[in-house]
Image (cartoon, rainbow, N blue to C red):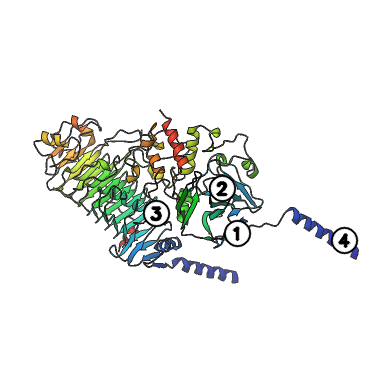
Amino acid sequence: MKRRQVRCIAFAALLWVALTAIAPRPMADDKLIQSESLPPKLSQFRLGIVRGMPVGRELERYTLNTPLFSDYAEKFRAVYVPRNARVGYRAEGVLDFPVGTVLVKSFGYPADMRKPSEAVRMIETRLLIRREAGWVALPYVWDAQAKDAELVRVGRRVPVEWVDLQGAKRSISYAVPNVNQCKDCHAQNRAIVPIGPTARNFNRDGQLQALVSDLPTQLSVLPRFDDAATGTVAQRARAYLDVNCAHCHSRAGAASNSGLYLGNDEPVGPTLGIGKRPVAAGHGSGALSFGLVPGHPEQSIIVHRMGSLQPGVAMPELGRATVHDEGVSLVSQWISSWK
Amino acid sequence: MKAISTVIAAALVAASASAEAGTIRVKAGAAAQERLQAAMLDAKPGDTILIGKGRFVLTDGLSLDVPKVTIRGAGAGKTVLSFKGQQGAGEGLLVTSDDVVMRDFAVEDTKGDGIKAKGVKRVVFTRLRVEWTRGPNTANGAYGVYPVSSTDVLIDNVLVKGAADAGIYVGQSRNIIVRNSIASQNVAGIEIENSYNADVYGNTAEHNTGGILIFDLPNLPQQGGHSIRIYKNLVGRNDVPNFGAPGSTVSGVPNGTGIMVMATRNVHVFNNVVGNNATANVFVVAYKFPYDDKGYDPYLRDVVVRDNTHGPAGWAPGFKGGDALKAAMGGKTAPIFWDGVGGAEARVHISDAVTVLTLNMTKPDTPISEAQPGVIDLSKTPKAAEPAAVVLPASMEAAIK
């Protein structure tokens, strides 16, 4: 009797060890993630973000075909999906992430952009958490040693320097957004939503297949704005405007009142800026008369505002302390090529 | 038994927590940006943010997204939010939540717009000053007080100076009162654009380029502006050279415009005192620019101009072709102009006891050089029915007290 009991217990113990080895204990604190709490330290979530890098084994790293421009910061993206939950496919708009999802985006600056993986100074990590009541946006700012990041709901200006690809020194006042400003870009019809991970933008390197169940056979791909092999100038410029502008310049976004809509699928016409006069731009119009003048980027208000750094003129309105020369160049090229 | 009393106790606690309205005080001093923005993030519905006396130096925009919050200073002369060093954002203060009351403070020198409320219900702006302290300058922000795409808007006792577009601007909104306010040194003093149901009364619009503008423009989500009453305003001495951004719609407003109505429907202008405006005291026209918008109506319709008191006007019309017009009229144009577009179908009634000029234009964009000006009597045109007075929710009027 005794021996049999011992053998049963031993077997159970072995089984337990085997099972926990196969299915490791969850790291991330799902309860905290899904609560209403605003933890002061990023580490409290136990997502596995080490020195700014989202390296935790429960995080799925990803890259977007055309990312948002953020003052030349290197951006490290990852998504955490709770165990046993599914990400659903959507043909249009952001993928269907389940409650408990955390989208992670860390921003860092290499000392020298020509050596992008060396001496990267991590500035902030932004989280977008899908909670029961809706998405919540939280900006965490790293300490100088990148040991941990603290929640800075009011935002912060951080002086940042780097050497660019041409070898020139750059120096800006980088703006960590306050939580209202997160919502300014991330709101559609007053509710916070993610922007980046749409199926089209996520579709590369097998990422969709790794993350999303029940994919259809026909999948579209957003061109990479900086890779001519992935689309025509027009397609890449439209992708660029979609990703950098359409979260506000859409019928449900912060600039819905402008009548200027820059989504990928917006038909060519006044809503895209052609023949459209400035209404509320003030001196942001740069003394120009129309949003977009086919053939003439230098007469187009869109290009003028992309090329400005002055508050009240610069577009996007938030998160821009530098001009994205490559983006301006692409959009200008597109406009120039119109007859 | 125990379960029920627990439930009752919990309910009582919950009820008292929500009934308690808190006050967050913010004093002048260092780190004003962080402390004011923190107050706006920490505020709960029902709270008041009390901003103390003094000058607050802001380095970025501020924003409020919590409903039922009052932001209150110690007075527009005493609590000053200075945005001279603003590094980012399109406005000084952005409000995106309902039932917000802003009162008793000043906003100075924003890089973009002054105070913007977008897509909100029941917003109150009262006893505020928004000013660009260097005076008229094309690089000043466009709008001072700027509710847009909103419903139930009250602008009461505000002062706006120096806006490079419109000092008090209400866009694409419904149910609006602008009253007892002063607009001076702006391009447009007060502007109601693409909006429905607005009462604009008891205001002073002096020393702007144009005093009060009522416009309806194409290519915007809300169009077909209508039902506007402009009454008991003082609109005089609008004599500031136009400093609006070249190419903008407002840059086309001639210097010395009193009240201008463009393309809007059912607009009643009455019991105002209008005078000393070099172009005209009252100007009613169709939309003059080419446009691509199938749903847009460029015509003026159902305008009533009556019982206004006129001072001198029209001695220096500020639009292209104005001098020729003046010469054609024997040296002086009239205090009231209509472009004539639409003819009888426009249903323009003007019964003020002054000369009224029509430009006899057949199409909205007929050039002035082809106008056939002539004196016209429009007092017999049947008057469109006056819109009912705008009534705002009681909570808004209560907030003024």
Q: Position of residue A301 (x, y in %)?
A: 37, 40
Which residue type does callout 2 highlight?
A: Pro
Q: CA distance from mark 1 to mark 2?
A: 28 Å
Q: Position of residue B118 (x, y in %)?
A: 38, 50
- Mark nearer the N terminus (1 vs 2): 1
Q: Position of residue A92 (x, y in %)?
A: 53, 40
Instruction: Say whether residue B79 is left or right of residue A117.
Output: left
Instruction: Say whether residue A166 is left or right of residue B29.
Output: right
Q: CA distance from mark 4 to mark 2?
A: 57 Å
Instruction: Say whether residue A177 is left or right of residue B116.
Output: right
Question: What residue is shown with label 3?
Answer: B87
Q: Are marks 2 and 3 in contact (CB under 8 Å)?
A: no
Q: In the displayed structure, would residue A334 be above or below residue B274?
A: above
Q: Nearer the viewer, residue A328 or A315?
A: A328
Which residue type does callout 3 highlight?
A: Gln
Q: Crowding near pointer 1: few (<14 within 10 Å), some, many (20+)?
A: some
Same chain? Circles 1 and 2: yes
Q: Are marks 1 and 2 in contact (CB under 8 Å)?
A: no
Q: Nearer the viewer, residue B289 or A287?
A: A287
- Closest to the camera, between mark 1 and mark 2, is 2
What is the number of the mark on residue A116? 2
Question: What residue is shown with label 1?
Answer: A45
Q: In the displayed structure, would residue B209 be above or below residue B369?
A: below
Element under label 2?
loop
Which residue type does callout 1 highlight?
A: Phe
The quadrant of the image that shows the C terminus of chain B is: bottom left
Same chain? Circles 1 and 4: yes
Question: What residue is shown with label 4?
Answer: A7
